[in-house]
Image: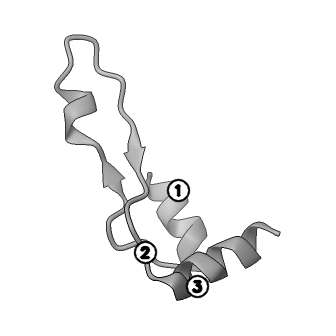
Amino acid sequence: MEKLRQALADAGIVLPTLRIDPATLAREAPCPRVELGGCSVDVAARLAAALR
């Protein structure tokens, strides 16, 4: 998650709700998932441009 956060920051993109889903850590056999969360339309457009 931190590598993703840094790569996004390097591209000028901040996903304010980027986090590890705590429910996936609470399972008997933890299987952590990263939640990308929500973002503004502007951030979504910059993310799409960065992926191109």
Residue position marked by numbered label 3 in the rendering: 12
Q: Using the numbered discs, state the Cα–Cα distance from disc 1 to disc 2 in whole angstroms.
A: 19 Å
Residue at point 39%, 67% (across, down): 38
**Residue at the outermost right position:** 52
Image quadrant occupied by the C terminus: bottom right
The numbered dot on residue 13 is none
Residue at point 43%, 72% (across, down): 15
**Residue at the outermost front position:** 41
Residue position marked by numbered label 2 in the rendering: 39
Give the amino acid type for the residue marked by disc 2 in the picture.
Cys
Q: Position of residue 16 (x, y in %)?
A: 34, 73
* Residue 23 location, quadrant: top left
Q: Of helix, strand and loop, which one carries label 3?
A: loop
Q: Using the numbered discs, state the Cα–Cα distance from disc 2 to disc 3 in whole angstroms.
A: 13 Å
Residues under numbered marks 1 and 3 in contact, where contact means CB atoms less than 8 Å apart: no
Q: Position of residue 43 (x, y in %)?
A: 53, 82
Q: Position of residue 9 (x, y in %)?
A: 53, 77
Give the amino acid type for the residue marked by disc 3 in the picture.
Gly
Residue neighbourhood size for the residue with mark 1, other residues' Cα within 10 Å, grouped as few (<14), some (14–19), many (≥20)? few
Residue neighbourhood size for the residue with mark 3, other residues' Cα within 10 Å, grouped as few (<14), some (14–19), many (≥20)? few
Q: Earlier in the sequence, mark 1 or mark 3?
A: 1
Residue position marked by numbered label 1 in the rendering: 3
Give the amino acid type for the residue marked by disc 1 in the picture.
Lys
